[in-house]
Image (cartoon, helix red, strand yellow):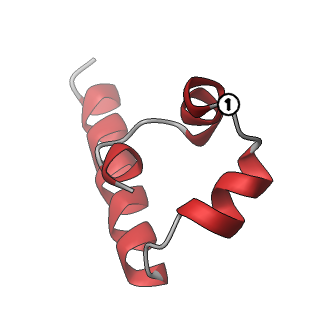
Amino acid sequence: MNQLDAGMPKELLSDRVDVSVPVLDKHYDHRTEEQKSKRRREELTKHLAEYSDA
């Protein structure tokens, strides 16, 4: 969960811990929908700021 909250993509993490993304979702990602939403918002804001600097 800490790696996901830090912004590591699930695909990368699944390779690192040797489980599929569905298994990662089902058994290891215990974040609430609110936590997932907050993380998505942070990532989108970061990337939108990069485009506005251009």
Front residue (pair 3, 49): 3
Q: Is mark 1 on a helix, strand or loop?
A: loop
Number of on-image labels: 1
Q: Dividing the image into 4 quarters, which one contains the N terminus?
A: bottom left
Tell me the residue at 54%/34% (across/down). 13
Query: Where is residue 16 shown, x and y percent of the image?
Result: 56, 25
Picture layout, residue 26 above or below residue 33? above
Q: Dividing the image into 4 quarters, which one contains the C terminus?
A: top left
The amino acid type of the residue labelled 1 equals Asp
Query: Where is residue 3 shown, x and y percent of the image?
Result: 36, 43
Front residue (pair 15, 5): 15
Picture layout, residue 40 above or below residue 10? below
Query: Where is residue 45 shown, x and y percent of the image?
Result: 30, 49
Side of 51 where 26 appears, left or right: right
Tell me the residue at 58%/41% (across/down). 10
Answer few, some or many: residues within 10 Å of disc 1's Cα (few below 14, many 20 plus, some between 14 and 19).
few
Front residue (pair 18, 36): 18
Q: On the image, which quarter does residue 41 sit in?
A: bottom left
Picture layout, residue 35 above or below residue 3? below
Query: Where is residue 35 shown, x and y percent of the image?
Result: 36, 74
Q: On the image, which quarter does residue 51 sit in?
A: top left
Tell me the residue at 43%/73% (across/down). 31
Residue underneath mark 1: 18
Picture layout, residue 36 above or below residue 34? above
Q: On the image, which quarter does residue 53 sit in?
A: top left
